[in-house]
Image (cartoon, coloured by chain):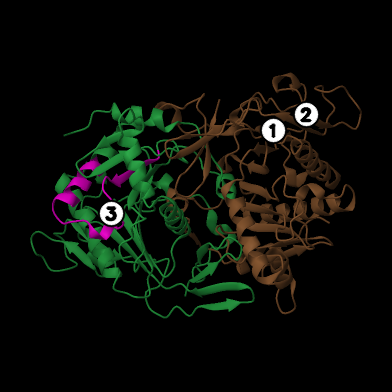
Chain colours: A green, B brown
Amino acid sequence: MPELRKDPVVGRWVIISTERSLRPTSFAPASPGRAMTFCPFCPGNEDKTPPEVYACRPGHEAPNTPGWKVRVVPNKFPALQIEGTMDRRGEGLYDKMNGIGAHEVVIESPVHDQDLADLPLEHIQQVLGAYRERVLDLHRDRRFRYVLIFKNHGAQAGATLEHTHTQLIATPIIPKILQEELEGSRRYYELKERCVFCDIVQQETGENNGRRVVTMSERFLTVEPFAPRFPFETWILPRRHDDSYDTLGDGDELRDLAGILKDTLQRLNRALDRPPYNFVIHTAPVSDGALEYYHWHLEIMPKLTRVAGFEIGSGFYINPTPPEDAAQYLREIAVEA
Amino acid sequence: MPELRKDPVVGRWVIISTERSLRPTSFAPASPGRAMTFCPFCPGNEDKTPPEVYACRPGHEAPNTPGWKVRVVPNKFPALQIEGTMDRRGEGLYDKMNGIGAHEVVIESPVHDQDLADLPLEHIQQVLGAYRERVLDLHRDRRFRYVLIFKNHGAQAGATLEHTHTQLIATPIIPKILQEELEGSRRYYELKERCVFCDIVQQETGENNGRRVVTMSERFLTVEPFAPRFPFETWILPRRHDDSYDTLGDGDELRDLAGILKDTLQRLNRALDRPPYNFVIHTAPVSDGALEYYHWHLEIMPKLTRVAGFEIGSGFYINPTPPEDAAQYLREIAVEA
């Protein structure tokens, strides 16, 4: 059983995999993903993953057979374990609990070498809809406080399988940076009685501004944040207040989001020659109800520079590309309609 | 002039280099350091760096000539600029200031390919003494609130020059993770009237414990922390309360620290085949006086796994090696006396 352990000084929870412990010799550089010949995510290999928990199957085939467009399965090597109780306990001054959680994989396309950005709009909409369905389902498990949706694209960004996919991790704790965002935005709300993200959207799109805006749709805004940690760090935010990803409407809203995500990823791909990247959806925690002070958004981080332990060890980032310059490069990219 | 900008939600300050902005084409993978033929840190090239601000010269040669054992120079390409005023100002809801600060390089040895861990004990003591002298001098500049001492060892850990060196960055802000440690340890002190790090030292070295202890000296403890983010993350802490690195005594204290640092780095080198690593010294900020609640320490992070934007974007770490296993491997390594 993996363990969740809490740092007693800064309160950060980490997952310690106690079962498949890596020995010192296990840290040899990984071979590049492209060399792999067998792919458990390709059609025909449905029996090589745990049984699907969701699928988009236009032809209504049987589960765990080919014919799907989007398929969600439990991770075969999960970081957290779904069965069991949390069993919170101390160890002297330390806090820990069982590593209970869900770890799922959204296989975004049956085609092995097709990237999310290159899928047709309707298909991206189905991927985003799959995220939402899984989040709604995982919310029913009262042990979980947060569902983290994230994508590692490219080996340099941590992807261990090249077949395009997203991961969901449901946890009994709120990950540290999300907790900080919730606290920071609540403090701002107490002071101003306004959502800080709504104020950001208003300022970035206001008259005589727009230097950090990349693109906009009816409902969403793509912007380079004011204080980005990384070159070309890019955020997509709803233009109107909305605390939670899982309340996205089925039709126009999901379609609008699919459109701006495709547009944004294509700009990044063209400007930066298809960079490895990560994205993380920041959304409200499971059980708080609608929050006036929090605003869901998607953060995209192209992996262009080496992030050293230094940055992670100090929280201090040096970014060589001003967001105003990055936004201008991305605005000037021509994208498909 | 670089800019310091603050994220309006989580309060993290980042340095935006506005002068040497990297264009999209500038992010090609860096060539490995070993290929470089000219080294500005080697003896004879003293005129290729800015003039030295400190040196350890047993033979009393003139500054900026060969003969030094340890040499400290301003960084030729500093992340922050030493001249100017802070000029704190707003931009709508955002906060920023001029990128004022000091950025120095401690060249640890005149020998190009000698690693810190392999230097004689007295030499490591002189390196650690150089850190202290520079911190004490930088504290005299009332613009600075923090002096961050960190080492990137190996290209994979972010080192751009292979000649062994450490960096110092003095900043007018307190880096985020240090701020969090200060706040977390103050909260613990308010509750318990004890330093949390003293409690950690006591628990880790207590009877029927020691599973996470790597090694110990008269004054210092090397331990794998309870909730490490990374495999083989290793901390060195003073065994008795001490908030600040810069109060270390010249003789026995510095010598004891040099000994346990050498011992610890040698264990990591042998267990992990000379891994790239980072270390960061966590110490009290400049002007607070002695803090009862804070305890300086050194955090070593071998670079063994790929840290993806995901971890950075969520603050959520999955560590495949329990610290108890790592400590056992490191304890069993034989090191030079």
Same chain under badges 3 and 2? The reply is no
Residue lying farthest to the left in this orientation: A59
Residue A270 is situated, as x and y percent measured from the top left of the image, at 30, 32
Residue identified by numbered label 2: B53
SS at mark 2 in the image: loop
Q: Is residue A245 above or below residue B94?
A: below
Q: Which mark is residue B104?
A: 1
Mark 2 or mark 1, earlier in chain: 2
SS at mark 1 in the image: strand
Residue B31 is situated, as x and y percent measured from the top left of the image, at 52, 31
Residue A206 is situated, as x and y percent measured from the top left of the image, at 31, 34
Q: Pointers 2 and 1 in contact (CB under 8 A)?
A: yes
Occupied quadrant, residue B68: top right
Residue kind at label 3, given as amino acid type: Asp
Residue A239 is a magenta residue: yes
Same chain under badges 3 and 1? The reply is no
User: What is the C-alpha distance between the residues marked 3 and 2?
Assistant: 54 Å
Q: Label 1 neighbourhood size at 10 Å, few (<14), some (14-19), many (20+)?
A: many
Residue A14 horizontal side relative to residue A289, left or right = right
Q: Which residues are magenta?
A: A233-262
Residue B249 horizontal side relative to residue B168, left or right = right
Residue A283 is situated, as x and y percent measured from the top left of the image, at 34, 57
Occupied quadrant, residue A244: bottom left
**Quadrant for the C terminus of chain A in the image:** top left
Residue A302 is a magenta residue: no
Residue identified by numbered label 3: A242
Residue kind at label 2, given as amino acid type: Val
Q: Indicate the chain on which mark 2 is placed.
A: B
